Amino acid sequence: MKTKLVILTVLTVILAIAGITVFPNFIQPFSPENLSESIILHEIRIPKTITAILCGSALSVSGFILQQLFKNQLAGPYILGVSSGASLSVAITILGARFIPVLSSDISIPIAGFIGAFGILMIVLMVSSRFGYGPIILLLGVIIGQLSGALQGLLSYMANPGDLKHFTLWSMGSFSQVLDQELLLLGAGTLIGLIWAFTLMPNLNIMILGDDVATTLGVNTSKTSFQLLACTGLLTGLSTAYCGPIAFIGMAIPNLVKMLFKTSNYKTLLIANVLLGSIMALVSDMVSSLNLSGMNIPVNVTTALIGGPFIIYILLKKNPA
């Protein structure tokens, strides 16, 4: 188990270094040849690589928590509509800043992302408490996604060209738009969320045995569920606010971790999700930076191309013909 974690850690470091120095072209990391290379290295590539690691970690851990809490391997921030809720809230903030000046502050976007994500999670929790954790939860997520998309389309239709371009570029997903204070906010918020998730793992371990057993062992299931959803809302809301609605990381990575790590130790699984989520985000960013046909591929496309086939495999393996 430890060997696998060490291998994943080394692979994450190698990919991070490659993302900084190699893609899309080589730059000497310690002594750039000229001022332009130094600017690219310190103001673009290093922040972008850090952002990819933070976003990949946040989304994979969010998906892991949701899959365990709802006992459904297809649960995830994107499928359950959490990312859609965060996207809608951020869309309102971006497109409404022209009319409400307070929405243009640096802190407004992460706050909007958290509120949108957390609000949807509360709806999902209320529905699941009445109807259980079956297919209706996934159907609810699809409906939320469609409604959020429709409302975003309406807002886009009403927006001016400048705001519309800003929102459209954001919705495609990117790790390269987070700089300076935004990176500090994303880093601090993600670190808090990951530490919070780690402290909640013992109670989540017990809750998997069933609510009655957990209550007998002294776990307040309602309080723990609320804390888990708030933690997920923080992680998903921040990553969506700053990087756009990134699909499939939160659903694919937790399933891959369970395939690679045959253990019920949730702390080990959480660390593995952080590492593998970072790896998928870094690889997706490298593919996006290849400048195929003179243009960069949006990160949302690359994560779908990588994670989509894996999810299809999971479905076919679970339900063979």
Image: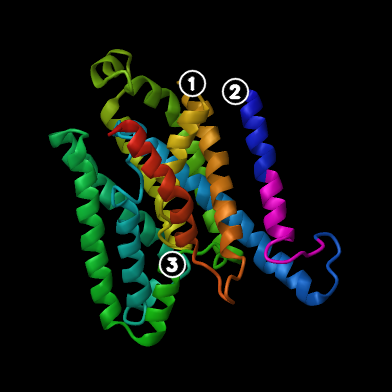
Q: Position of residue 27 (x, y in %)?
A: 78, 65
Q: Amino acid at mark 3?
A: Met
- Measured along the vertical axis of the image, is residue 260 above or below residue 248? above
Q: Which residue is at a point 46% across and 43% down the rendered structure image?
A: 60
Q: Is residue 293 visible?
A: yes
Q: Position of residue 9 (x, y in %)?
A: 66, 37
Res 208 label: none
**Residue under numbered circle 2:** 1
The answer to which of marks 2 and 1 sits earlier in the sequence is 2
Res 263 label: 1
Q: Amino acid at mark 2?
A: Met
User: In this view of the protein, which residue sits in the foreground, 248 or 265?
Assistant: 248
Q: Secondary structure at mark 3?
A: loop
Q: Position of residue 260 (x, y in %)?
A: 52, 29
Q: Which residue is at a point 36% across and 61% down the rendered structure image?
A: 112
Q: Is residue 47 magenta?
A: no
**Residue under numbered circle 3:** 172
Left or right: 193 as drawn, with respect to 319: right
- Look at the numbered discs 2 and 1 and tell me whether their residues touch, using CB distance below 8 Å: yes
Q: Which residues are magenta?
A: 13-28
Q: Secondary structure at mark 1?
A: loop
Q: CA distance from mark 2 to mark 1?
A: 9 Å
Dot 1 surroundings within 10 Å: few (below 14), some, or many (20 or more)? Answer: few
